[in-house]
Image: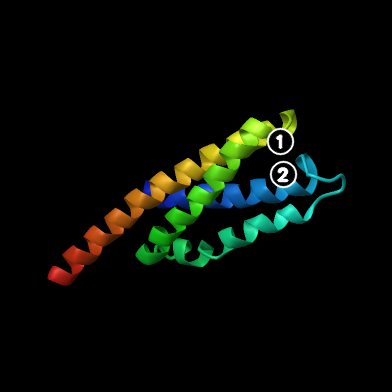
Amino acid sequence: MRALYLIANASLVLLIALGIAWESFLAPLRPGGSWMVLKVLPLLLPLRGMLRANRYTCQWASMLSLAYFVEGVVRAFSDPAPSRYLAAIQSVLAVVLFVSLIFLARELGRRQQTGAGQ
């Protein structure tokens, strides 16, 4: 469970960092940065709950990650070269986040059931 916890939190932090770097200076839509950097704000919402290993937060954050997967796939097939690669990385990070959160939520649920049953 510790590995799932670390993978989930690391992928969330990396997704936030990638979004900020991408839209600020790596490949912004407009030179000098763009307002698209605000797309990382929803990713900040589950950060506290995930650091505390809250099962409910893991469940809804997994659904949130799918939006970033979809955006990454769309931009990987439609954007020019530098942005295309960043979009592919975003898609991979979103999938890693989704999968790790699903398994982490399941493990947290099992631990709650065994703890409540004792």
Image coordinates of residue 95 in percent, x first then y, are 47, 41
Secondary element under disc 2, as helix, strand or loop, is helix
Q: Is the residue marked by circle 2 packed among few (<14), some (14-19), or many (20+) residues within 10 Å?
A: many
Q: Is residue 91 left or right of residue 117?
A: right
Q: Amino acid at mark 1?
A: Ser
Question: Which residue carries the number 2 mark?
Answer: 22
Looking at the image, the residue that sits furthest to the right is 31
Q: Is residue 9 left or right of residue 30?
A: left
For the question of whether residue 10 can be seen, the reply is: no
Looking at the image, the residue that sits furthest to the top is 81
* Quadrant of the frame with the C terminus: bottom left
Looking at the image, the residue that sits furthest to the left is 118
For the question of whether residue 88 can be seen, the reply is: yes
Q: Which mark is residue 107?
A: none
Q: Is residue 52 above or below residue 37?
A: below
Pointer 1 or 2: first along the chain: 2
Observer-side mark, 1 or 2, equals 1
Residue drawn at x 59%, y 34% is 88
Q: Is residue 97 left or right of residue 107?
A: right
Q: Is the residue marked by circle 1 packed among few (<14), some (14-19), or many (20+) residues within 10 Å?
A: many
Distance Cα–Cα, label 1 vs label 2: 8 Å
Q: Amino acid at mark 2?
A: Trp
Question: Which residue carries the number 1 mark?
Answer: 83
Image coordinates of residue 94 in percent, x first then y, are 51, 44
Residue drawn at x 45%, y 61% is 50
Image coordinates of residue 92 in percent, x first then y, are 52, 37
Q: Is residue 98 above or below residue 74?
A: below
| Image marks 1 and 2: residues in contact by CB distance under 8 Å | yes
Secondary element under disc 1, as helix, strand or loop, is helix
**Scheme of colours in the image:** rainbow
